[in-house]
Image (tube, helix red, strand yellow):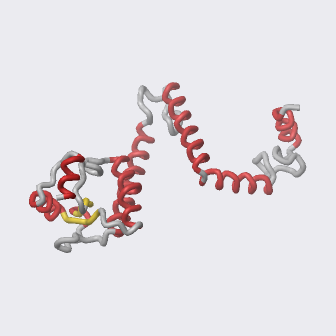
Amino acid sequence: MSTEPRYANAKLAGLCVACRKVKAVESRSMCAVCLEKRRLHDAYYRKTENGREHIKAGKKRRYYRQRARGVCTHCNVPVDGRSYCDRCHETVKRAAYELHKRRRAEVLRALGGQCAHCGFSDARALQIDHVIPCCGKGRRKSGHDYVRFLTQDVLPAIIAGKNLYQLLCANCNWIKRHENDERLVSKYELEERVRG
């Protein structure tokens, strides 16, 4: 017997569709015990690498399916050739901005919250600087790339105790760049500088 008729029969009878023994919770299709088992399973599954990849792939498929249908990828309102309707676009922009602010504040706190050279502490003028200049990695990043750079490169390095990044005010950072002749350099030129 296939699972579809059993599911439908259990649902019609008002029984839990998972165990088919106990009455289902009102407005749900499962009993309280099975709902809790499902919640725990889903929570564990989201933590596994395979589970995260599966969830990410599902979201990606949903996104492209909705784009092909010509509807907003968040609320299914018809849109003309865009990913989001105006209302959802503003919501997504605001959420991205808030995430950027939170991640940057975490990094500034982790790096001491003031310029390593002069002690200036206004967050608007503080910049994350590479202690050893590198060939542009982390520079000119904006939006999601910048948030990814903060969470995947800077914060783990700080937590691990590596002295790869420092906090400088804009003036001290530009003075350091000028005095050390820091510009976008090739990987080979950087290796020569580090050796010599």
Image-based side of 133 in relation to 175, left or right: right
For the C terminus, give its image quadrant: bottom left
Residue 121 % position (x, y): 23, 71
42 or 50: nearer the eye?
Answer: 50
The residue most toward the bottom is 119
**Can you tell which quarter of the image residue 131 is in?**
bottom left
Considering only vertical position in the picture, is 123 above or below 44? Answer: below
Residue 7 % position (x, y): 83, 38
**Can you tell which quarter of the image residue 53 is in?**
top right
Residue drawn where x is 52% and y is 25% of the image:
69
Residue 128 % position (x, y): 27, 60
Residue drawn where x is 86% and y is 41% of the image:
10
For the N terminus, give its image quadrant: top right
Image-based side of 40 in relation to 113, left or right: right
The residue most toward the front is 195
196 or 6: nearer the eye?
Answer: 196
11 or 50: nearer the eye?
Answer: 50
Image-based side of 65 in relation to 153, left or right: right
**Can you tell which quarter of the image residue 110 is in?**
bottom left
Residue drawn where x is 34% and y is 47% of the image:
143
Residue 170 % position (x, y): 17, 61
Total number of numbered discs in the rendering:
0
